[in-house]
Image (spheres, rainbow, N blue to C red):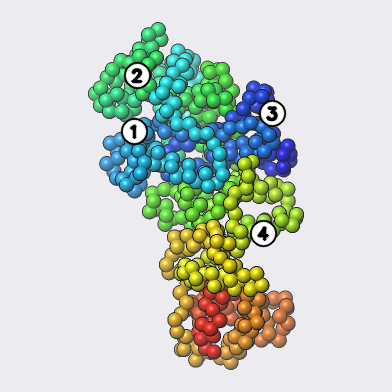
Amino acid sequence: MAGSSETDWVSRFADEVIAEAERRAPGKVIVCASGLSPSGPIHLGNLREVMTPHLVADEIRRRGYECVHIISWDDYDRFRKVPAGIDPAWAEHIGKPLTSVPAPHGSLYANWAEHFKAPMIAALADMGVEFHGISQTEQYTSGVYREQILFAMRERERIDAILDKYRTKDKGASQAPKQAPVDEAEAAAAEGSGAASEDDGTAAAGYFPYKPYCSACERDLTTVTSYDDATTELAYTCVCGFSEVVRLSEHDRGKLVWKVDWPMRWKYEGVVFEPSGVDHSSPGSSFVVGGQIVRDVFGGEQPIGPMYAFVGISGMAKMSSSKGGVPTPADALEIMEAPLLRWLYARRKPNQSFKIAFDQEIQRLYDEWDALERKVADGTALPADVAAHARATGTATGPLAATPRPVPYRTLASVVDVSAGDGEQTLRILRDLDPADPIASLDEVRPRLDRAAHWINTQVPADQRTRVRDEPDTELLESLGDAERESLRLLLDGLDEHWSLDLLTTLVYSVPKIQAGLAADAKPTPELKAAQRAFFALLYRLLVGRDTGPRLPTLLLAVGADRVRKLLGA
């Protein structure tokens, strides 16, 4: 994969970033960047902001270059609104830095920002994402950006002139066509932290790109009334009634407005690659305006990088309404292994939207993943698919943890469903899947088994769970015709010699063929398919009391031969 510019989108971006870095600063560490605001749960849409530069930075490291992926935690942003599910009393903190807002009730963390950063940091560790985190609270309050702030204030007229070119465009930007969110959940995700829409520093007394947090109430409901370049004295008033004069060369309780803050950081950190969301594609967006400010004011260069599309969610309406937001990477990692989640982001170009499944679609997704693993192993996968698989299963540091015996996810989910999660029952069923090479311990199918169990227990409604009958349905059995009785006899007669997943699959499909006078390997016809559906529905009604359920071979193994015979009237 190293050095190839034709393999996949990651390789092509790595080529561009390496070339651009060599042009800008030959021999220096290449900087890729992401920015995240811990204003609430950091969701799976935000994860694309991280995964895009992570994959590119990882490819650069694979090629032997020194590269760092920084994540700027925008934890010095203002608290904008109280999310759903949080005590409305938190409204009193609106306008404070996120690090000055108390964490939600019951949290183990010191403040709001740390509460929401922690699960994201843990999820990124599970996914093998290496990064250097930068707290903007620490940067601003320790005076790291003091010279940049003083410089921006000296150059405020030039910044104001640049912003003014776009202010009229901003009004028309809402009329410009935008990519529609994938679904309602993503529409909520697209709203983001709101940093891009904050005021740009315009005030009645003039333009000032710095906004102080009030020394009395800690909020940013302040207005700068004057500034002296020579003394750096800045006067402001707050809606709380407080006012003061501070010396900006010593003041560390405020920050540059967003449209100046972002380009300042590009220059300060030397960022070469950073993606941005589709909300930054309008004429007056932070990314577009920032490109001119970083060049014309700070003397730097805008990062290269793509606009990335929305990430949608399927099957999470229940969780979204209860948790007040779209699901997070931590939520996804409870139901799927890290390589699969990485693969979803690696296989699609950043400008392609996709959905992450929390519903039944996750089973098909896992089937697709397992098929890819087989193709990679036997050398039949396409080069781009091989590359995406490699990026999903490991990093430049090494491989990610994998399930030793990757039993199909849908099989594990069915086993957990039928066994109600009982360990001994689960192992018994799994051992029978392949008697020639039996599974000896549940550890062989972990962590996939645990992910499937969590999916069954949290995402499958109770009325869709499988409950095997305790006693035979004598009324139904007595009502059966001769053909139906014969089909049950053929199945029961073949149970013992077909007691494995593959052989039971052959058996249940062949019974209707035998009844029709066909060979067991006969090609299906419309009539035969109809007979098979009717046979399967009969088995489901007798075993679980409804017309559908888990795949029949798995269900038969789970129920056990003796109980199957009892329920089928033997």
Q: Distance between the residues labelled 2 and 4?
A: 61 Å
Mark 2 residue element:
strand
Q: In this view, does 135 lie to the left or right of 392?
A: left
| Foreground tag (2 vs 1) | 1
Above or below 404: residue 23: above
Q: Please state, as top left, top right, bottom left or bottom right, where the C terminus lies in the image.
A: bottom right
Q: Distance between the residues labelled 3 and 1?
A: 42 Å
Looking at the image, the residue that sits furthest to the left is: 241
Name the residue that disc number 2 marks.
Answer: 224
Which amino acid does the dot numbered 3 rest on?
Ala
Residue 100 image label: 1
| Foreground tag (2 vs 4) | 4
The picture quadrant where one finds residue 349 is top right
Say whether marks 3 and 4 touch (CB < 8 Å): no
Viewer-closest of 132 and 275: 132
The picture quadrant where one finds residue 457 is bottom left
* Crowd tier of the residue under label 4, counting other residues whose Cα lies within 10 Å: few below 14, some 14–19, many 20 or above: few
Which amino acid does the dot numbered 4 rest on?
Ala
Above or below 480: residue 204: above
Q: Position of residue 167 (x, y in %)?
A: 47, 25
Say whether marks 1 and 4 touch (CB < 8 Å): no
Sooner in the amino-acid sequence: mark 3 or mark 2: 3
| Foreground tag (3 vs 2) | 3
Name the residue that disc number 3 marks.
Answer: 19
